[in-house]
Image: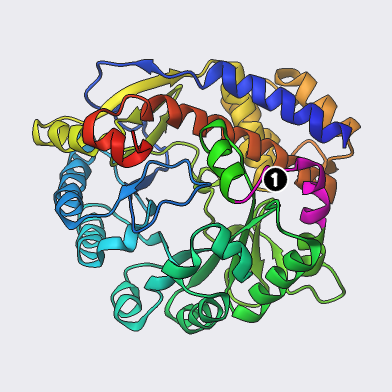
Amino acid sequence: MLTERMLTAVVRQTTKNYLQLKPTTEVRVPGPRPGMKYMLYMHVPFCERLCPYCSFNRFPFSEDRARPYFASMRKEMHMLKELGYDFESLYVGGGTPTVMLDELCDTIDRAKETFSIQEVSSETNPNHLIPEYLDKLQGRVQRLSVGVQSFDNGLLKQMDRFDKYGCAEEILERVGQASPYFTSMNVDMIFNFPAQTEDILINDVERVIESGASQATFYPLMASPSVARSLAQTVGRVDYGREQRFYRIIDELLTGGDEPLFSHGSAWAFNRCGTGVEGEKAMIDEYVVDYEEYPAIGSGGITYLGETLYVNTFSVNDYNAAIEQGHMSLMGKANFNKHDRMRYRFMMQLFGLRLDKRQFMQDFGCTVEAGLPAETAFMKLSGAFATDTPEEYTLTPKGRYLMVVMMRQFFIGVNNLRDQARAALTGEERKLVFGE
């Protein structure tokens, strides 16, 4: 649709303008601001298999590389403690955080000893949904997010996940068995694969419902430049022209009807009704909805504090060396001006389904309409707002889809930022990632 194409072009250009990585000589992130609520992000960049659609920092797993890396992250946590940080929430992303379970558990335990952490969210893969893993994660992790991507065996084979992570039927059974172990069990799904038909998509949604998972996150396939070639060679070229139709199918099957099975946690996260994790209380992958500022530890971690976004080195070797020398591994940063920060707030809060106008006024000294006249006018003309009061904006179904478009392009922009950092890899590490 025209509004989707316009929005895609605008967000692509704006993210290109302000997500430009510049070198930095800073050795530690700034300290916390009084009264600010922070979350800690931890990145584990190791995978048993590298997926063609993934732009995150990741390397093929080896124990010799991973074990000292976890030790470095535990040291880096104490650097944040020395700066005065405390955290109530921890998100462990990857890569595959559970690729070395004993090290992950030790690191989570150390984080809980060091900070006031009440909730932990971790990512994993389907082959780790087995009792010996689940027993150790239970109690340590409140929300487990498993990368399923699709319950279609043909698509799993295209993604090179079938042999490593199991067939769709096995994954479905494992998700059901794992769900009782956690407060929230999330399945990560991807929609709009080139080979994905409407029937395949409907089957995916039906299997999510059948799985018993308390949450499902449906991401649109994101063809950032770094993965566009590998995507074209493995799953085909992405067609954004049918993305809205696919999103509508997902939305209607999960949240439609007189007695909906799921409710919206964000524009693309869906929480099962009656599970105790509905709505805003549920942890979601896009932690930036609840925590606008967050330090990130680990190689490839991205920190956002105040007006600055920091990127840690993508080299595991350089990361370990920096931590051993007693400083963080910051290799670049991007600065946001006031208008950039207003746009970021606008996008993140609306992605989380509600923009708090009073908070916006308090933080930026102007109304949303005065600070972002073009953005608010576009959304109003597009029919995106269900509620427009002095207190808030909320979204219509069309508005939720427009937020999916905005976040898709924003994350493609972030992936471009990752590409800038990844380009600095040399030697063996470059060969492991690029095959050069």
Viewer-nearest residue: 69 or 200: 200
Whole-percent x, y for residue 291 in the image:
48, 43
Residue furthest to the left in view is 325
Check disc 1 and report the residue beneath it: 354
Q: Residue at x 18, y 57 (%)?
A: 63
Is 392 placed left or right of 96 in the picture?
A: right
Residue 240 among magenta residues: yes
Q: Is residue 6 above or below residue 265?
A: above
Lateral position of residue 171 relative to residue 371, left or right: left
Residue 109 placement (x, y as % from top left): 22, 62
Marks counted in the figure total 1
Q: Is residue 223 left or right of residue 371?
A: left
Helix, strand or loop at disc 1?
strand
Which x, y percent locates residue 334? 44, 20
**246 left or right of 175 in image:** right
Crowd around label 1: few <14 · some 14–19 · many ≥20 (10 Å)? many
Is 289 above or below relative to 34? Answer: below
Residue drawn at (22%, 44%) of the image: 77
Query: What type is the residue that disc 1 sits on?
Result: Arg
Q: On screen, 155 above or below 75?
A: below
What range of the chain is rendered magenta? 235-248
Quadrant showing the C terminus: top left
